[in-house]
Amino acid sequence: MYQPPHFREDDRDVQHALIRAHPLGMLITAGASGLVANAVPFHLDPTASAKGTLRLHLAKANPQWRDIAAGADVLAVFQGADAYVTPSWYKTKQETGKVVPTWNYAIVQARGPARVVEDVEWLAAQIAALTGQHEETRQKPWSVSDAPDDFIRAQMKGIVGIEIEIASIEGKWKVSQNRPVADREGVAAGLGELPAQNDMIDLVRRYGGLTTE
């Protein structure tokens, strides 16, 4: 990933927090089938290995798992908040006019050795962990055990597990921190006029050293 130093985010806790907040990642492999990408919900276990372990499952009908079993290189990409940035928000536009549009975003990429898992107990634990992660905030959380056992067993016959021990992980937070302070203020103010941009506003202000009031 192209990584200018001022956009680099190396804090492991911050990287992991983005994965947990945006668990629908892109699983990318380069193997016998060529380049293959599938959107898949991941579950992160931060303590299972030095940099964390990602666990997921794929449909057996999806040939990507066979490439992984054969040793294909694996990349997982997680996209956080993002927003188009118009030059009209920059004070520099009024001063010199020498500005162009850009896009702000936060992203994490993880690589590592991957293995295919068909063990029933592993699959049951992965499904339970993934479901629990997303149900725990509901007033009446749904549990895998709410469904009939024979139905769940039949469903599990159609999937395979994938485990990725993260060997390298990169975070890139491109959130206007390379712009002058007045431009950063303009971006935060401009985003404030748009719907559903609170996350990006927070990133622009925190990484840009602006007050959060």
Image (tube, rainbow, N blue to C red):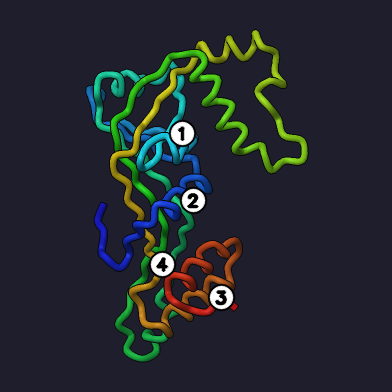
Q: Residue furthest bottom?
A: 95
**Residue assigned mark 1:** 40
Q: Is residue 31 above or below residue 46?
A: above
Mark 3 or 4, closer to the camera? 3
- Disc 3 or 4, which lies upstream in sequence? 4
Q: Secondary structure at mark 1?
A: strand
Instruction: Please say if the residues under marks 4 and 2 sit with CB atoms less than 8 Å apart.
Output: no
**Residue 191 image point, x, y percent:** 53, 71
The amino acid beneath tag 2 is Ala
Q: Circle 3 sits in a helix, a strand or a loop, which is it?
A: loop
What residue do we see at 36% from left, 59% from top? 9
Check disc 4 and give the amino acid type.
Answer: Val
Closest to the camera, between mark 3 and mark 1, is 3
Q: Secondary structure beneath disc 2? A: helix
| Marks 4,1: beta carbons within 8 A | no
Residue type at tag 3: Thr
Q: Is residue 70 left or right of residue 183?
A: left
Residue marked by disc 2: 17
21 or 58: nearer the eye? 21
Question: What is the C-alpha distance between the residues marked 4 and 2?
Answer: 17 Å
Q: Residue at x 48, y 80 (%)?
A: 185
- Is 123 situated left or right of 36 in this image? right
